[in-house]
Amino acid sequence: MIIADCIKTRKQFKKLMSKVEKYRRRTMNTQMMSLYDYLGRAAGPDLGQQVAQSAAKSKPRPKMETRYVNQGGYKGDVILYPKWFLDEYFGGGTNEGKGGNKQLLFG
């Protein structure tokens, strides 16, 4: 329960609401995705290792699963991450359908 007397400034309110929103996204959005599913392309071993290391260090630690794939010249296990973690790691994805002007560029 939130006590109204604890929130005295707009900054405190925004900080609290930010935490509430992050918690809501983490609990409501449990869709598991591989980097290939999220990015729409093969991520490669370097990016995959960076994401895995970041997931291992992050608090709270996201739940990770594995899935066996055999397609496109790759055969083996891939790691699945919660969509909320990938959104935070990549800064919200490609922003498709949003009004933002940030976009991930693939080269």
Image (tube, rainbow, N blue to C red):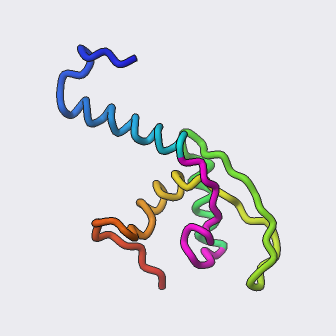
**How many numbered discs?**
0
* Residue at 40% over, 70% down: 96
- The quarter of the image holding the N terminus is top left
Vertical placement of residue 13 versus 53, above or below: above
Left or right of 57, for residue 107: left
Q: Residue furthest left?
A: 9
* Residue at 28% over, 66% down: 99
> In the rendering, at what x and y percent does residue 49 appear?
64, 64
* Residue at 54% over, 72% down: 39
* Residue at 54% over, 39% down: 27
Q: Is residue 30 magenta?
A: yes
Q: Is residue 75 magenta?
A: no
Vertical placement of residue 51 versus 3, above or below: below
> In the rendering, at what x and y percent does residue 45 appear?
66, 72
What's drawn in magenta, residue-wise? 29-44
> In the rendering, at what x and y percent does residue 58 appear?
55, 45
To which quarter of the image does residue 100 belong? bottom left
> In the rendering, at what x and y percent does residue 15 appear?
30, 35
